[in-house]
Amino acid sequence: MINVTRRGMLRAGAAGLAFAAMTGSVAHAQTYGGTLNVGLTYEIDTMNTYSTGYLADAQHVIIEGLLAPDENAQYVPVLATEVPTIENGGIVVSEDGETMTITYKLREGVTWHDGEAFTSEDVAFTWEAVKNPEFIAESKSGTESIDSIETPDDYTVIVHYNKIVPDFASTLFTFGIMPEHLLAGADLNNHEYNELPLGTGPFMATEFARGQYVVLDRNPNYWRVAENGDQLPYMDRMVFKIIPDTNTLMTQLRSRELDMVVKTPYNQAAQVESFGGYNLMVGPLLSWAHLDFNFQNEFLADLAVRQAFAHAVNRDTLIQVQGGFPEAIKSIVVPIFEFYDDETPEYEHDIDKANAILDDADYVMGDDGIRTKDGERLSFEYVTAAGSADDENIQQILMAQLKAVGIELVPDNRAGVALREARYSGDYDLYYGRWITSADPVYSIFYGSEGFLNGQSYSSPELDVVFDTVENSIDPDVRTQAFSDLQRIVAEDLPTLPLTTNVSLITVTDRLQNFTPNPTNMTNFVDTAHWYLEAE
């Protein structure tokens, strides 16, 4: 087992994992062939990386962007030849400091899976397509900041931004480029691309059985070669099996029907070691578990009720039931980030204080142990992912902890698209989930007044101003102060209750070599070309 869990280990630990993976394969010849069967714990809604409401694990094997975060959460070039910076001239800030221009130099000789050449026109098209108001995208982040794009030749892209965008690498062109020759003039909401996307990546989408599996076959004309000159990728096929039910997932691991699970249930991790033939890898993850409050509910809009929640929750118990893997947090900025502020206010576990807050706010304890106010019980519908053992265990614990202060939580769990729709539309009182971010996270999407993942109807003009500063300044001192303000406001206003960090708990067959965990929302599958399976 490889174990990396603490906050200071993001770069050093991830680098160590990479070293372990590479040195572990030195004694073996890298071999071609084989099929890797991957268990996904969620139902894929679409194969379009810009439309999906979930992590694009399978999609990132097919689609490539100009840049990508590596195992150290550092951006590296993919379809671009280098990461633009001020130092290398790729980023030029205007004299008034209000706008900027970014120039990308593209790789030559890259082809789409159908043999057409990849060019700068594809990059410009991607911007036009995603920003199109008729296209229903999960996120259009990054499109609104661009005024125009020039393509002076096939391998040069000049992007003119209407403001300073320090997080440019974590948005639009990193998540994938779409083929202009296939999609120009098409309805992106209903095109077959959403089922079998065309990319430039190491594997090609060949079959998608909704709710069951995705089959990806080796791209024989992939543009990358290994350092030793081998044509990549090594493996013949990857199959992503959709298995939302935790018990089924573990059964298929035990029976060797799966070779890899990137979201191994915390409370069942010990079983994996007893199966034999697998390695359990614990890596850093830019992720946190949270309990969100829907402000459309008049009682949850009451700060006193949210404060009572904060004092009633015992994070130590939540950590214990998850095998001791997560860590307690008090901020939505996880401690692994440089902008984390340890001075962020926190709420200690204190049942007496929670009860006192509710008493003072005139929430009266009823004979059934549930508080009431104006004849209405403090009873809330609690939504989380159905079939997820970790999430449903947390739900049971929170139900018991809140019952101790007179608050009733009623499970209303959803799966697949139903869960996604509930999250977006605010069809819940309380929502428990886990966010995972890019290497340069944008928090306004979650808690900004216009955030597209803000299904809870929370709005804070003060916080919106802070978000604007965070997302539009390249001055490190200004950003540091803004991040501190961001964390303070969220802690004081409590639109959400950050509970624990998450770690990446990955089960892989011991035959898989050259795999290194990726801690970002680009998923562990952003760089699969070098992976190979040892012969059985």
Image (cartoon, rainbow, N blue to C red):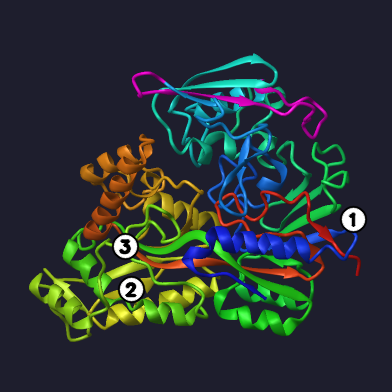
In the image, what residue occupies the spot 34% across and 41% down? 470
- Residues 284 and 214: in front is 284
**Residue hosting label 1:** 33
- Quickly name the residue at label 2: 409
For badge 2, the amino acid type reads Leu
Q: Is residue 284 left or right of residue 234?
A: left
| Magenta segment boundaries in residue numbering | 94-120
From this viewpoint, which residue is outermost toward the top? 152
- Residue name at image x 29 percent, y 45 percent: 482
The quadrant in which the N terminus is found is bottom right
The secondary structure type at the circle numbered 2 is: strand
Mark 2 vs 3, N-terminal side: 3
Q: Earlier in the sequence, mark 1 or mark 2?
A: 1
Q: Main secondary structure of the magenta part?
A: loop
Q: Please name the residue shown 61% across and 53% down the image.
A: 523
Q: Which residue is mark 3?
A: 342
Indicate which label's residue lies in the foreground, 2 or 3. Answer: 3
